[in-house]
Amino acid sequence: MADLFDDAEPVQGGALHLAEGAILLRGRALAVQHALLEGVARIAQAAPFRNMVTPGGHAMSVAMTNCGAAGWVTDRRGYRYAATDPLDGRNWPAMPAAFAALARAAAAEAGYPGFVPDACLINRYAPGARMSLHQDRDERDMTRPIVSVSLGLPAMFQFGGPRRSDPVARHPLRHGDVVVWGGPSRLNYHGILALKPGEHPLTGAVRLNLTFRAAR
Ligand code: SIN
Ligand code: FE2
């Protein structure tokens, strides 16, 4: 496991330029890790993790839930944002203040001041779960960035360009890392390679990812 993620990058602190408009802030979420994890646990009690189905009819390997005014959902009808949880018709849990504050601060650090996310997609990866290369394009305003927070087990992030055929770089994401992309890289293709088994002291055998967006 360790050798897979052995590279020249620092484990925490510092920033890595990924592309024009895209930056990886190492360990940026560590100061609020407990607030984030407590928030996720509370949200998952009200809106449980579930494996949603793609428009093509495949169950996603990543389990998902949401908090905030808008939640990202997929089913046979397509990808979209919904104000309510399709499982029970209730509003998604409110976005905790600590979540929004971290997203706003990380976005500002990356050069996107005044970011106010209304959607937080929470992804849970068990070993073997993956997210194939895709663009985040279901949001109304592409001038607002994406803020993506990693917790728990490490994973390999793929980050390409705006075309599917563009070269794709790989960056290990570890507990507490935050990636921000926007502006010229807002529509860059990205994904997560299949999660390797492991045990994290705070999350156990899973990786969690919080993706903040201004959806509406
Ligand atoms: C996503 O693109 O929605 C997830 C990215 C991640 O899990 O880091
Ligand atoms: Fe994405």
Image: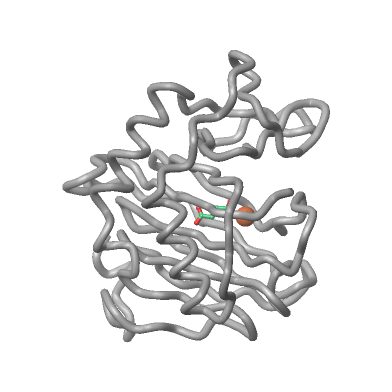
In this orientation, which residue lies closer to the viewer: 95 or 148? 95
- The location of residue 180, given as percent across then percent down, is 53, 70
Residue, x 63% and y 74% (percent of image)?
168
In x, y percent, where is residue 205? 28, 40
The residue at the point 77 percent across, 60 percent down is 141
Q: Residue at 61% across / 54% down in the picture?
A: 213
Determine the residue located farthest toward the left in the rendered image: 201
Is residue 200 placed above or below 72 in the rendered structure?
below
Residue 64 is left or right of residue 154, and the answer is right
Quarter of the figure with the N terminus: bottom left
Q: Is residue 28 above or below residue 76?
A: below
Image quarter where ligand 2 lies? bottom right
Q: In this view, does 215 lie to the left or right of 39?
A: right
- Number of labelled discs? 0
With respect to residue 25, does 90 lie above or below? above
Question: Which residue is outermost to the top?
Answer: 88
Nearer to us in this view, 89 or 188: 89
Q: Which colour scheme is used?
A: one colour
Relative image position of residue 66 (x, y in whole percent): 53, 36
Which quarter of the figure has residue 90?
Answer: top right
| Image location (x, y in percent) of residue 7 | 33, 80
Residue at horizontal 28%, vertical 47%?
A: 35
Q: In which quarter of the image is residue 10?
A: bottom left
